Image: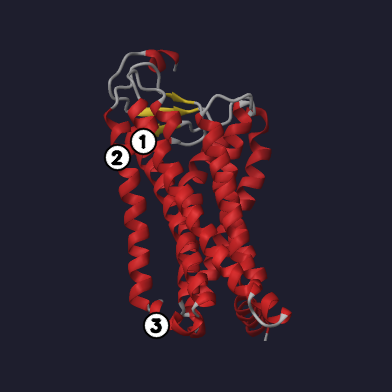
Amino acid sequence: MSDSNTTDFSNPSTFILLGIPGLEAVYVWISIPFCAMYTFAILGNFTVLFIVKRELTLHIPMYYFLCMLAVTDMVLSTTILPKTLSIFWFNSREINFNACLTQMYCIHCFSLMESGIFVAMAFDRYVAICDPLRHSAIMTNPVVAKIGLVVILRGGTFVLPSTLLARQWPYCRTNIIHHSYCEHIAVVRLACTDIRVSSYYSLSIKLLVILLDMLFIVISYVQILRTIFNLPTKDAQIKTFGTCISHLCAFSTFYFPHLFASITHRFDSNMALHIRILMANVYLLLPPMLHPIIYGVRTKQIQERLLRLFTQKGT
């Protein structure tokens, strides 16, 4: 193994994922919460998709965007967990070079797509609360489809250059990745060339896109809150604000861990490597698990349909 990892090569056929260095003795125990989060994420998001598909009254923009979020969450968590578990359970650390780049592309592509979906959801809430009489005229099905297409194209297009750059770098030092999945900066750091272009592009896209998305969301909710505070009664204010709480919770579970994990992994930090890798896994697994719970608890329509579903099965 050591010879293959130090031999000069310009295009490695495989990379070696170390997993979470230092925690090998507790891999089985770590896999339990990881599996639990993944199971809840898949079941919860699939339930959301099933309920929205079955209930015609939920065929409105808010729930279309929620379905897009559910699909994105399932893809994100599925992109990393199977390989991570194969490391934990079977010590299967090798990953094909092209498979590694594909995993890298999917992780960052779907992360940007998820950010774009949150922007679309914020815009939908803005129109629904600030201009309710025109909501149905503005947020038509063709408009929702176009927004979804833009979100997909934006994520795929912005991430593609960093993946192509990573593919053309010469890797002649080692093929050992100090991570449990093919995170972009962990891979390109193995290149035996100046990777500043790749690093700066990836960081600028991630920060600029996500920070601009967060800014748009903040501006939208500032306008929403102004409209809510101008409502005539306290009950109307509380009821209207209640429709936004689930979105705000979902935004928080995605953006703050995402930014924190990205920055701490890219820059030198006093944080231990195994803690950083654990956090990098959790920030991709925890939001997909929490989102269906948040929307299920806070959205009355989903609660009613879910209760009706279990009641019918019980009878």
Along the horizontal axis of the image, is 48 left or right of 72?
Answer: right
- The nearer-to-camera label among 3 and 1 is 3
Give the amino acid type for the residue marked by disc 2 in the picture: Pro
Callout 2 touching callout 1 (CB < 8 Å): yes
Q: Secondary structure at mark 2?
A: helix
Number of the label disc, if any, that sits on residue 201: 1
Where residue 27 appears, x then y in whole percent?
Answer: 63, 35
Where residue 167 appears, x then y in whole percent?
Answer: 29, 32
Work out whether residue 74 can be spotted: no
Q: Who is closer to the viewer here, 57 or 133?
A: 133
Image point (40%, 18%), residue name? 174
CA–CA distance in space, label 3 to label 1 = 39 Å
Q: Residues within 10 Å of mark 3 (few under 14, many from 20)?
A: few
Q: Quadrant of residue 270?
A: top right
> Where 151 sits versus 88, above or below?
below
Disc with the residue nearer the chain's start (3 vs 1)? 3
Along the horizontal axis of the image, is 115 left or right of 12?
Answer: right
Along the horizontal axis of the image, is 257 left or right of 74?
Answer: right
- The nearer-to-camera label among 2 and 1 is 1
Along the horizontal axis of the image, is 74 left or right of 3?
Answer: right
Where residue 160 appears, x then y in whole percent?
Answer: 31, 43
Label 2 sits on residue? 161
Work out whether residue 207 can be spotted: yes
Give the amino acid type for the residue marked by disc 3 in the picture: Ala
Q: Residues within 10 Å of mark 2 (few under 14, many from 20)?
A: some
Q: Secondary structure at mark 1?
A: helix
Label 3 sits on residue? 137
Callout 2 touching callout 3 (CB < 8 Å): no
Q: Secondary structure at mark 3?
A: helix
Give the amino acid type for the residue marked by disc 1 in the picture: Tyr
